[in-house]
Image (spheres, rainbow, N blue to C red):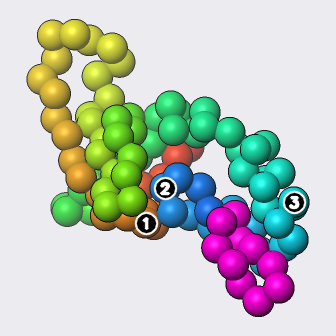
Amino acid sequence: MEPVGDGFIAIDLLGRRRTAAVDWMLAEEALDDLGLTYLADPHELRLDDGSWLRVRISEVSPHAICVKKDDWGDMTASQIYYSVSFPVTEDRLRPLSH
């Protein structure tokens, strides 16, 4: 959580703001409600050529987010990893739209 004035902004593990400035309890509840499942969901990564690639998040740290090309669990597929700067922006890494 990030203190702002008399309130706090809830920030997820990807560095994205999830609330406006609210009291501590509301910010904490927002993060509790969010949980961690969004990290397991498929995402899309914008590549340097502007195209989008389906990826899965493999590691998150305060320095970078590591994603890998989604191989749908194929153990024989080549592992292709990308590093994304922290915090991530929606124009670089976004949840896969259905």
Residue located beneath label 1 in the image: 87
Tell me which segment is drawn in magenta.
1-10
Residue located beneath label 3 in the image: 25
Q: Is residue 60 magenta?
A: no
The three-letter code of the residue at mark 1 reads: Pro
Dot 3 crowding, Cα within 10 Å, few <14, some 14–19, many 20+: few
Q: CA distance from mark 2 to mark 1?
A: 6 Å
Residue located beneath label 2 in the image: 14
Q: Is residue 94 left or right of residue 85?
A: right
- Mark 2–mark 1 contact, CB under 8 Å? yes
Depth check: 27 or 83 in front? 27
Q: Quadrant of the N terminus?
A: bottom right
Quarter where residue 16 is shown: bottom right
The three-letter code of the residue at mark 2 reads: Leu
Q: Earlier in the sequence, mark 2 or mark 1?
A: 2
The percent coordinates of residue 51 (x first, y second) are 28, 54
Dot 1 crowding, Cα within 10 Å, few <14, some 14–19, many 20+: some
Q: Is residue 62 left or right of residue 90?
A: left
Q: CA distance from mark 2 to mark 3?
A: 21 Å
